[in-house]
Image (cartoon, rainbow, N blue to C red):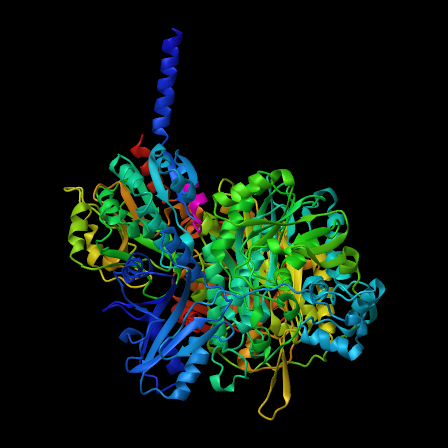
Amino acid sequence: MAARRQSAYQRKVYDFLMATPRVCVLRAPGTNCDPETAHAFEMCGAKAERVHLLRVLEEPTVLSGFQVLCIPGGFSYGDDIGAGVIFSSHLRGRLSDALHTFLTADKLVLGICNGFQTLLKSGILPDGAAGITTDSDSERDTTLTWNDNGRYTSLWVNLANLSSNNVFLRGIDQIEMPLAHAEGRLVVRDPSILETWRQNGQAALCYCSPPAVSRDESTGNCNADHWLTAELEYPLNPNGSFANIAGLGDATGRVLGLMPHPERFIHATQHPEWTRRKLRGDGDGLKLFRNAVEYFG
Amino acid sequence: MLWEVEIRPAAGQVDREGERVLAECSGMGLQSVSTVEAARSFILQGELADDVVTEISRTLLADGVVESFSIHQLDAAASDASNSSNGSHLLNVLFKDGVTDNVANSALKAMKDQKVSVEAVATCRKYRINKSASEAEIARLSAKVLSNDAIEHVVSGTLQMNRISLGGEYKFKLTHISIRQMDNAALEQLSKDGQLYLSLEEMRTIKQQFVDLDRDPTDVELETVAQTWSEHCSHKTLAGRISYEDENGPRQFGNMLKETIFAATVSIRESLGDDDWCISVFKDNAGIVEFDDKQSVCIKVETHNHPSALEPYGGANTGLGGVIRDPLGTGLGGRPVCNTDVFCFGPPDYPHDDLPRGVLHPKAVAHGVVAGVRDYGNRMGIPTVNGAVYFDERYLGNPLVYCGNIAMIPVGKSEGKVSPGDLIVAVGGRTGRDGIHGATFSSGELDEDSEMRSAGAVQIGNAITEKMVMDVILEARDRELYSAITDCGAGGFSSAVGEMGEETGAEVWLDKCPLKYTGLSYTEIWISEAQERMVLAVPEANVDEFSKLCSSEDVEAAVIGRFTDSERLVLKYNENEVADLTMAFLHDGRPPVIRKASYKPEEETPLAVPAKDRFDDDLKSILGSLNVCSKEWIIRQYDHEVQAGSVVKPLVGVNRDGPSDAAVVRPELESNRGLVISCGMNPRLGDEDPYWMAASAIDEAVRNCVAVGADPSRIAILDNFCWGNCEREETLGTLVRAAIACQDVAVAFGTPFVSGKDSLNNEFSYEDENGEKQTVVIPSSLLITALGQMDDVEQAVTMDVKAAGNKLFLIGTTFDELGGSHFALVNGLEGGAVPIVDLDQAPEIFAAMHKAISGGLVESCHDLSEGGLAASAAEMAFAGGLGVTLNLAALVETSNIDSDAVLLFSESNTRFLVEVSEQKAAAFAERFNNLPCVEIGVVNDGDQCSVAGTSGQTVIESSIEELRQVWKQPLAW
């Protein structure tokens, strides 16, 4: 009897643990959005831990204990030789094997702002697991670089979800979020890559104008592809990104990188017009974190 | 070997830096400059093969998608085409030796991490100018646009170097100063040549001390005394004896600040009794007040004026970095949650050719200062949420840069205590030659040669280092690993250790301080103001754990001494004792400063209001004036939302471009309790009457706070006096008069001062074209910063009108007070009465306003300040994207004024324009029983701002879109 009771208890613990994904919020020197990002995950029921990069470099296998890896915003290493460059060089170096393992498992990776810049410059975006093992001789085809206006810019944007498979964006058509960056302009070597991204659902988030665009019910895809070719100027597309892209996913839909900050819209009172629209309660940005937690539910 | 990696925009990419420089050239009229190509380069020193340099360039230094690069050896016979002038003028801009180069340092570290055998890295900016450009214009371009010779130098033509300078040799030699033999003239010379900025009497006191000791001081002893006794560190003028006289007769102060501003706080705390919510005021690096049962909140505002005049970017950068270290070094350490900044500049359209020698153009100053604050605040991850900018020609040679920081301290951690035996631990940045003599330099006056004399004083910050320091300190605080902490600010280790060890004594081992490069003397180590350093008292038992914590986050910590019970300050360099001073002499030995101050009120002259039928143009001129117009260009460069606490943003409304009265921030993510941050300042009124200038600044700061929902019974304020040379009786007189007003108003409002700072000697001297010395004194500039609180941030209101049909109420009384107003400014009018504050009624209005807002009766609320009623109504309308209609006739009875101009533009204090829904209008008006409250208009769904005058005729009817544009355009850089 005792043994069976214990076993039932253990199963309960196991179920509980599985339903409570562990999130590694990976911080490097100069990362500064880690507390609020961890808080956003915790609000949605995850167990989030802020882990220093030095600790992971010492022992790359720590990563295996987590279901979600999140690289939050900030200025890792001061962005001194380009946003996310030094952080990404550590990912590509000593951590590449551990990351490859992580990416091939059924796990999630989120990069916000500096985290997106880091994922992109490491190769994890847009190519996922394949990107981190790619022979270092191959040239990157995509980058995030200086905004068209040449300076750090902080404002709210409207975003359209174009991806039918990205886990973080499930159930979202349009969403508002703040952004704050100097190097958020997406540039590609060859514009034809857009067609591949579009087909794979990788061109995940686009800057768009406020009116809502509905989902095409018959295919389940968004007819919001229109935003990939729309002519949007500042402040709608605040940095001049190629194809108005604000966020990229990998082909599996389990990796997302985005310049805007969902963790800064966890309370309705963070919205710039909350007093006009009489908003109360949770902010829409929580949806991304909730989707990640529910993926393991 | 020395390699240069030159990085250019790839084909098809815009050369933004080149475009910027070319635009500056055309702005300055440099017509012969027609093309500018910009590039950046890394100079690498080490035994490196060319394929290694290529690989590191490709993977680390250049972004191959948007940039291309080339490499060449600098020390080889330089014939590589890419380094040559290539048919154009080539200019290379390099940092001077010893100036912090963050990019080079990061690149060096990243390369070492990748096992590249590089020894040193430097960075360089390169510009290729069309061959036909004239030498004279290129020289001008180099000096005015491409470089600031306080920190950089320009090498023209092909760059030729053999190695990157890495400091020099240092051979210990103890230096004594034979002060005992010096006569008065020699003492004064020593003070001047040594940049000690001490008075003759202070020098004589030092001399006597060493005569009594029967020995000469060492150089480092003399420096230590000068740092400790500097105006910057000891506030000897304002905390000194002042014999003051004004129209009310003479008044003697034994300690002016203590008897005015501190006294106000003391009396407020006494009258609050058990409800006193101040925790620590005027004693630590920042003032601390209660917040909730878990956290206290602390605040500090500092200035960094003289460094910003010389090197705007570095000055403002380290100004913000420095003030962030204040709360971090308060009590046992505060967690910073937001920043504030207020700037005063010369006019941005000032003609280049009329600038006095040694003065940077105000637009360049503004660009540099904003970038400096931006880069520090954003990188630290601390939102910059509130600020203001003022323009006046008198700020030309002496701009003002105020930076503030607000931080949370857990209840019970508001005080640290040094015990003898605790180790002195320096944490963070290394010590270099940067910022030598900052404390004494800032206490003197600026002139055209300041740049030459004080090159060592120019500092550049590294926000990432400070962020890393902050992270480990907050963790160590929570683990209770140290017993006291302070920041290294002005005076460096000298001030930090001197203050911490004041009650105990300290012995410092200067050779143990980590250095950026070799070659520093023991004195330089002791007084360097290198950035990002904190000093902690760590009990010996905790040192290992503390060091381990630091190294786990790659932060450098070094034990540099021990606190003792000797009540002496002893400095050693290896085995050599280089200083031995008693704490008593250092902290209490300074002879008192005794000053005279006088104030003669000016006879008030009437202001002749011009007769007009319409005031649309006045309104537009005011909205488009530099002090009033939109500061969006600055605000959008600041991250005001990091830490996820933003509730009321600096810009609000339907287009997110209306000017908020104050910021509301939620400092704890789990709680709805909020902080409210605002400021008040009006240098224009200081020219009329410093008493009412100060009173108005306090009223403005408090009413801004109340306008968004702060509880007026929980507002703490700070004073920052920036004044001219207070050795002049009449200059000090205006300051004393302002301080008396601070006392009167603070007590009347029940609003305690919790901290403050003064910066005197804000003057600029130069020789005019006739060879005569001219001195420009800044306007008396008192900044009041208010820190309010609100129980529930969801009760906050913003200033944008919300819905057609809502009523508009004017709260507060309008008086005929156009003196110093913006209406007077744009019409070139003199005289008139300045706004006063009704000390009895104002607190009642604030309390009633707060009840109305917290009771949910208010849709929007905006304070009335520069431009009066008309400007506020216009701002509320365009922020909400709705029309407003006002009727001035409604005001005639209560104000007894029938002049449309006065009713529209008077800048009377303690007034709010409030939007209330029809259903709540009666309840709202009831809150203001016996207080001035007039229904003055309505919100409509049109697109006009319309005002009917006292006799019913239209006096303003302008489209809100046009008003928005004139307000937004002037500083849309």
Q: Which residue is at 31% across, 50% downward?
A: A258
Residue B201 position, x and y percent, is 80, 72
Residue B363 position, x and y percent, is 47, 75
Q: Which residue is at 31% across, 41% downward?
A: A109
Q: Read off the magenta span.
A: A29-40
Q: Is residue B717 left or right of residue A171?
A: right
* Image: B295 above or below A106: below
Q: Is residue A171 left or right of residue B335?
A: left
* Image: B360 above or below B632: below
Q: Which residue is at 27% across, 55% downward?
A: A208
Q: Split into 4 quadrants, where in the image is the N terminus of chain A?
A: top left
Q: Is residue B767 left or right of residue B578?
A: left
Q: Is residue A58 magenta?
A: no
Image quarter for residue B758?
Answer: bottom right
Residue extending farthest to the top is A1
Residue A241 position, x and y percent, is 27, 59
